Amino acid sequence: MARCDFVDDPSPSRLVVEAFLLSGEPLPEIVLRQTRGLRNPVPPQDSTADAATGAVVTVAIGSDTVAYLPGTTPGRYRPARPVIAKPGESFSVRVQWKGEVVTAAGTVPEPIGIGEACVRVPDDPVEAILVDSLRRDSLDIPAEQGYIFPIDVSVDWQDSTDDDSWVRTGIRPSSDFSSGVVELFLQPVEVDRESDFSFASGSASRRQWVGVYAVSAEDSTAPVPAHEITVSLTRGDSAFASFASSRTDPERREPVSNVDGGIGVATAVALDTLRLAVSEATSGEQCELP
């Protein structure tokens, strides 16, 4: 993450924090960058020009406090010793840089695990618009008619005991098949409070989500193209949910931050993914377990 300030020479630069603790895993690297003026872009040949060096970084987790050391790449800091981020532990990140102190805090979520994942492919493709015709007047892009397979994907998981947990669900195809306009009317990603997801059929302890993505087809009789998808579940707190839901918002300059004294995100998440193969012979429902 990085940010350009509106003013030419921001004084002082703001610190940009990027820290994602994984539930049940060792503490991660923390990336620190600094903002720069809009007319002072990063040199293409120097990917570390925005690195925030010389910072003092510590992470307090549970009853332990871990100092961070400069990593091999400028702006990256690594824990001085391995410490596991245990589920349920509170943590705080503290960064001292150029006389300023930046902090963030949260709680490590419970692990999350994908149960059964099912793909439902329709027998035949449907007609659809495959280009961004909504901007036709401004860009003079002709609307093209084509065909897509709208494919449903359902996934379930064990419900959390934490009433304040949030979950981001997602489907990512191995290739970009459909336009962004098509996906506006589908649902390949959702971020919601975990308690707002419905229970899986016949279960009072497992949550379920159904998403939709699209695959383009050559014509009305073509089979579904062979491809792979990655289904993901990410559990976190409200700070993670605000970041995840705002990071692609076109009306925002930057995602919602939970960093006091700076910008960026420092949060803990639990993550699980499952890769599924969809072949040309796939039709109807196909279910897999991890």
Image (tube, rainbow, N blue to C red):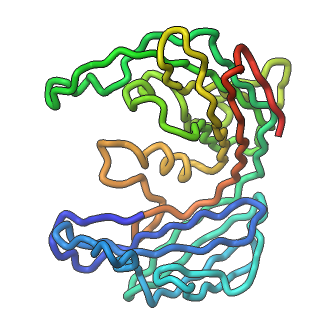
In the rendered view, would you say 12 is above or below 272?
A: below
Q: Position of residue 11 (x, y in %)?
A: 22, 79
Residue 164 seen from this side = no
- As drawn, is 273 to the left or to the right of 249? right
Q: Residue at x 67, y 42 (%)?
A: 233
The image quadrant that residue 168 belongs to is top right
Horizontal side of residue 287 vs 68, given as left or right: right
In the rendering, at what x and y percent does residue 61 appear?
70, 72
Foreground pick, 249 / 57: 249
User: Residue 116's quadrant in the figure?
Assistant: top right
Residue positioned 37% across, 23% down in the render = 130
Q: State the image coordinates of residue 173 (x, y, percent, origin top left).
A: 57, 37
- Residue 148 in percent (x, y) is at 49, 18
Quick one: 220 or 138, which is closer to the camera?
A: 220
Residue occupying the point 78% across, 44% down: 113
- The quadrant of the picture occupied by the C terminus is top right
Q: Nearer the viewer, residue 48 or 77?
A: 48
Res. 53 visible in picture = yes
- Residue at 18% of width from left, 76% of height from top? 9
Decide if residue 78 is on the left or right side of residue 56: right
Q: Is residue 22 above or below residue 43?
A: above
